[in-house]
Structures are given as structure tokens and as C-alpha cells.
Image (cartoon, rainbow, N blue to C red):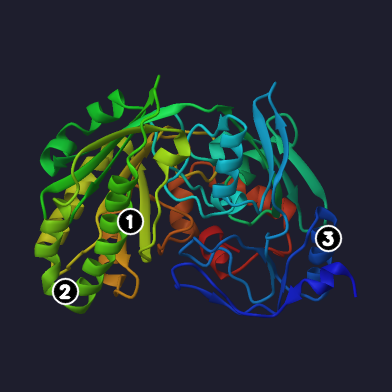
Amino acid sequence: MTDTYARTTTSAWRNWAGTVTARPVRTESPASVDELVDVLRRASADGLKAKPVGTGHSFTAVASTDGVLIRPDLLTGIRDIDRKAMTVTVAAGTPLKRLNTALAREGLSLTNMGDVMEQTVAGATSTGTHGTGRDSASISAQIRALELVTADGTVLVCSEQENPEVFAAARVGLGALGVVTAVTLAVEPVFLLTAREEPMAFDRVTAEFDQLVAENEHFEFYWFPHTGNCSTKRNNRSAGPASPPGRVSSWIDDELLSNGVFRAICSVGRAVPATIPPLAEVSSRAFSPRTYTDIPYKVFTSPRRVRFVEMEYAVPRERAMAALRELKAMIERSPLKISFPVEIRTAPADDMMLSTASGRDSAYIAVHLYKGTPHRSYFTAVERIMTAHSGRPHWGKIHTRDAAYLAEVYPRFGEFTAVRDRLDPDRLFGNDYLRRVLGE
């Protein structure tokens, strides 16, 4: 028995939020590109679909399969750091948290990142994971090259110079074009960010949104439903010195309040929905202003221990506050009781075919509910508002859009499906989710 076969299992797989369960015929954990090629060839010979899966942080079934589930656990680590080109090449199964800490040890950093770093590099980039930024875009936009194994076992190296049309598609590829095995990301010398967190009234932050985005490199805010209160965060580069939050204050804000107390509030609210509005008023006032300075990943990211389900839409930035005000009005006139804050972030336009910011400056409006809380009524109402503003759903978060709708809001949608037709004509990497969002 070969090593590849020795790493074959048949257990069920479940995503982080518990919204998707897959029961593949087998699960493979290849340790090299050659082993992966063999896995794909055997899947094809057996008439099975094949899907790579990361750490399960997508809320959709984008990585689900009843065929061969490919785990990237053994395809990890940094392959190369090029200090002249200022790039890092990393195996696709490497968790972002390991990449961030490894880069920091080398005195390097990504320019921008999301607020969670549990995902694998390939999982995060393939679904368009992003943070917030006036000038700097998603993690996928920082890709300078990638290695892709296609359905017939071909290993393609893709960049702006080599296979550029595949590169434009595969940076946010949904796992539909092949299996990404390595990613080359732009990096820069590690720098300091000063974070300024403070409460702000909803009417003020929405009125001053454009100014706040223009004046800060990274601006985001959270609105607490059933209140007029928001929590804002501004991250800007700093000359230093580093001044991280104190251990005690950090534990109070990031663990006790953001995770421990918040989990308790959500649990009470799920059991007794009528308690949510008064609890929201209390929790929205629990966070005091604070300012701290640290290296990027310690400022951009935060622990998320309260499990939830999420929907997020990208809308044209100039329409974001109108959409948010409509969302607020909808909640206020409905019987809905929402315990989770609504998150708003931004991104500049980029040139990737299926990036949610493709061709337009965008703002992201994300809504969440505590795990186990019925979400359909809320998410349906939110989706109705967002689609009226030409919203694009995050590929890894709950939505009901199909290929007909998505072809209308993505100007390069047809280019992507043409690349897919060429690389995977028999849909080795297909599943029900891709059939819905990309068509047959």
C-alpha cells in the first residue's frame, strides 16, 4: 500500500458553523503535488467528483462533495521567500495564522488581511476573503502567482505573465478550476498599525462614512441592531513605538466581553428573544474607547470563539449607507430580534473576474446570527435589500443567488465560465453549489 492510500479515510466532514455536512466516498490527504495528481486521476477513473477543502470556515457548500474530499493538511509550509521581489511562496494548505506568525519572524507582513486567520491560504483566497481597506484590497489581490493542478493532472503556473487568463480567474476560483497547491503573495517589511476603537452614533457614522473611509487606511464599524449605537475601528500605519494592549485589558475586551459575555448574551437571546433589544443596548455600551499599536496581524485579526452563521454582500460603495439605512428600518418595523452586530467594511476596485470588488469600489455589509438561531427570515429580508443595490454575495457565506443573477452583477462572469469550460469540461470539481452559482 502506498503512502497516498495510507492517508485515505472515509469519515464525514462538517464545516465550522455546522451548516454543511459532507459524506464523501473517501477523503485523501496528499503530501505532494505528484500525490495530488494521482488522487485526481483515480477519482476521475472511478467516476467521482473531487473537491479540495480547507478548515471549513465557509458557510456555504462550496467545498462539499459526495466523491473525493481532498484535505490539504500535508500541503503546508513556506516554500520560498524572495526578498528582492518581496514575495513569499506558500503551500496552499498553510493556515493563515501560521503564515502570519512565520512572516513576522522574518520581519515581513501581508499588506492587508481579514479579521479571522483560521482559514488555509487557498481556502481564504479561493472564496475572496477580505478585510477592510481604502487602498489595499483582499488577500486574493495580493497574489502574484499560483500553482494549479487541473482536472487532467496538468500543473499550471499562473501569473500576469504566464497563463494570465487563468490567473485572472483562479485568484478567486471557488475550487472550480482545479486544486491550488501553492500561492505566491506580495509581502512588505513588517510595519506598525495604530488601532483606534471608539463608539459612535449610527446617524453620525453613516453621515460621515465617506470622510471616515477617505481619512483612514482601514476603517470599519459595527452597528448594534435595536440601538442607535456603533463601534468604530480605524487602523493606520504608525512610526511607533509599539504599544500593544495590556494583558489584562486585552483579556477583558477580546475574551471576556467579545467572546465570554457575548456568548452568554447570545444564548439568553436565543432562548428568550424578547430580551435581545435591552441586552443589545447594554452590550453596545460595554466597550470603552482604546488605542493601541502593534504589528499588522495582531491588529487586523481577533479571536472568534462564538459560533454563528453569516451572510455578506458587497455593494457599490456609494450605495452602502443607503442599503444599511434600509436594513435598519427593516429590522425596526419587523418582529425580528437580532443579537449580533452588523459589520461594515470597504475595498477598492480590483481586476479579478469573480472578486466581489471586481471593477468597482465596494462596501461590505455582513449580518450574523448566533449558531442555532433560525436565520431564514432575517437573511431573506437582508438579501432582498442588498440585491436591489446590485449586491454581490460573498462566495463563502450564506446566500440564494444563482448563475442568472450573478452573470448580471459580474461583468466578467462569462470569461470565468469560459476558463472553467476549458480547464474542467467534465466538471471533476463540480458540486451542487457550483452548479447553482456558475451554471451547468
Q: Earlier in the sequence, mark 1 or mark 3?
A: 3
Mark 1 and mark 3: span between their CA atoms? 41 Å
Mark 2 and mark 3: span between their CA atoms? 51 Å
The spot of residue 260 in percent (x, y) is: 29, 63
Q: Is residue 147 visible?
A: yes
Q: Residue at x 41, y 64 (%)?
A: 400
Secondary structure of the residue carrying tag 2 is helix
Q: Earlier in the sequence, mark 2 or mark 3?
A: 3
Q: Which residue is mark 1?
A: 255
Picture quadrant where residue 429 is located: bottom right
Q: Closest to the observer: 320 or 246?
A: 246
On screen, 19 above or below 420? below
The spot of residue 372 in percent (x, y) is: 33, 75
Q: Residue at x 72, y 57 (%)?
A: 424
Q: Which residue is mark 3?
A: 35
The spot of residue 125 in percent (x, y) is: 56, 47
Amino acid at pointer 2 = Pro
